[in-house]
Image (cartoon, rainbow, N blue to C red):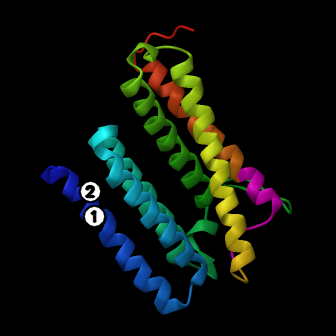
Amino acid sequence: MTRAHWAVLLFTLGYVAVFSAWFLGTGNTEFLFYVVTMLVLIALVALSWRKGDYPLPILWALSLWGLAHMAGGGVPVGDSVLYAAVLVPVVENAEMTILKYDQAVHAYGFGVTAWLLHHLLVRHYPPARGSLSALAFPALGAMGLGAVNEIVEFIAVLAVPETNVGGYVNTALDLVFNAFGACITVAAIHLSGAKTST
């Protein structure tokens, strides 16, 4: 690992340690579940970084996603946490609220996931570069991983009483914003100059 790689890793482990202490201190057992998930993901990236040859911008984007996630569950805002904060009141009614911090993090995070999947696809299968498949599969893969994230949240709801995960509408909105972020990312990859073919 280079010094730049160590910088990303130490930054990430640093904020995970700080938020872990915060969650323990406040009794937030729900987000301790997410800390474990974060540590597993960090280990997966660390163990696969040689074969994946992840560019530093992707590693920093992943790390910032983790930070946004930890802050969302740990930073108090009013009577709730940052995840519930409304960034721009696009839609506000009894059924749902758009745009919340949570939804922005979902769009960003699974946009980064699509970027990572695109990188892995074209790295290991260079002939796919610039093809429609190299755009479609990362977008669909990111949406699938977004669904896995919702399963993890569902497990947290079952395992930990009084979670702040939300109900059916929240889950549906999470999936929509996951898809939005993934599609915006692959559109940006396409517009960056890669020629698309089937």
Instruction: Check residue 6 for magenta coloring.
Output: no
Residue 11, label in figure: 1
* Span of residues in magenta: 163-173
Where, quadrant-wise, is the C terminus in this rendering?
A: top right
Residue 167 vertical placement versus 113 (above, below): below
On the rendered structure, is 119 left or right of 106? left
Residue 183, label in figure: none
Amino acid on which disc 2 is placed: Val
Tag 1 near tag 2, CB within 8 Å = yes
Amino acid on which disc 1 is placed: Phe
Residue picked out by circle 2: 8
Instruction: Check residue 168 for magenta coloring.
Output: yes
| Category of crowding for the residue at label 1, using alpha-carbon neighbours closer than 10 angstroms: few (below 14), some (14–19), many (at least 20) | some
Task: Identify the residue at horizontal 48%, vertical 88% (top origin).
Answer: 24
Q: Is residue 129 visible?
A: yes
- Percent x, y for residue 160? 69, 81
- Percent x, y for residue 53? 29, 38
Find numbered disc 2 in the image and state the secondary structure of the residue it sits on. helix
Numbered marks: total: 2
Residue 114 vertical placement versus 81 (above, below): above
Quarter-of-image position of residue 51: top left
Q: Is residue 90 visible?
A: no
Q: Nearer the viewer, residue 151 or 84?
A: 151
Task: Identify the residue at horizontal 22%, vertical 52% (top origin).
Answer: 5
